[in-house]
Image (cartoon, rainbow, N blue to C red):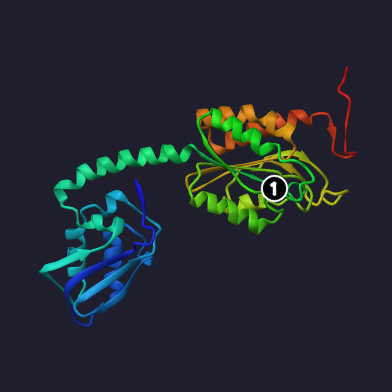
Amino acid sequence: MEYRLLNKTEIWVGPVGLSDVNLGRCASAVARTLSLPEETVSVTDAQQGHLVFDVMSPTVGAENIIARKEAMLAALSEVPGVSITPATDIHSDGILGLINVAPAERADILRKSQAMGREIADRISKRAMIFPTGKEVINQLIEDTNSPFLKNQLESLGFDVVTSVPLPDDVAKIFQSIRAAVDDPFGLIITTGGVGAEGKDQTLEALEKLDPTASLPYVLKFKKGTGRHDKDGVRIGVGTAGSSLIVCLPGPNDEVQLMWPVLRKALVEKWEKDALADHLRGVLSEKFSHFNPHHGHYNHPPS
């Protein structure tokens, strides 16, 4: 289980004897003890018989901090110029205080942490955020019918759903809004709109910033630069960030409704992002199977 440190990131060690000590080596010793990258731990104070370390990682593994006091003091004692005594203690507020747990309590706390972690993960997985996008919705030129539809459907699956105010067609704003939802955290984030081939369509660009490995299959392909097509096609997107699944759907409500059964099945069966993206693409591609991208209209199906 990963613990979030929030703003409680300091570790105090003292009393200690200090003589011509390399503080970088002290920080490295603490980082190794906590199984953290060395660059995420620094010494912020070294005077009056104590050392203060700052952990610059947002999370730490439960198994890496619980009952690690003796290991940390032993690691520091190996740094030239650092003297550890029987009176030397470690103090930290918040989650990092678990460093001081007695070794005999370690197994029980880990077990409880794992159970709590599963419970928290389950709660997060059932939290959903919906972001409509586009100036047409912002300016109330069209009604946002997607958000209430998706909210109703998701709630029927047991999700706790929050709907956002519409977002502008702006990469930075969409990215920041989704990033905030990832950090909140919401287990499911859905956007509607902004996946087309016009220059104003920016949702998938925001998704790629969050997840460079996002699955972005084409539904339709165009010749870039023809008509209003500033891009070479229409795509949908599915990505992940943190503990969040991010699904970028089209804007038209009939298309969202068409794709919902696939998304529902994926949520119930916990599909991977590539499988979900491919199935969503397949459903929408079928709708456009008689669309002529060169002329911008539908061909009549063969009789």
Taking depth in this image into account, of 302 and 13 the one nearest to the observer is 13
Amino acid type of disc 1?
Answer: Thr
Residue lying furthest left in this view? Answer: 86
Residue 281 in which image quadrant:
top right
Task: Locate the C terminus by quadrant.
Answer: top right
Coordinates of residue 84 in the picture (x, y in percent) = 14, 70
Residue that numbered label 1 is attached to: 133
How many residues crowd mark 1 within 10 Å: few (<14), some (14–19), many (20+)? many
Coordinates of residue 172 in the picture (x, y in percent) = 64, 59
Q: Is residue 17 above or below residue 283?
A: below
Q: In the figure, is residue 243 to the left or right of 248? A: left
Q: Residue at x 10, y 68 (%)?
A: 87
Task: Locate the N terminus by quadrant.
Answer: top left
Q: In the figure, is residue 189 to the left or right of 223? A: left
Taking depth in this image into account, of 6 and 55 the one nearest to the observer is 6
Q: Is residue 134 visible?
A: yes
Residue 222 in which image quadrant:
top right
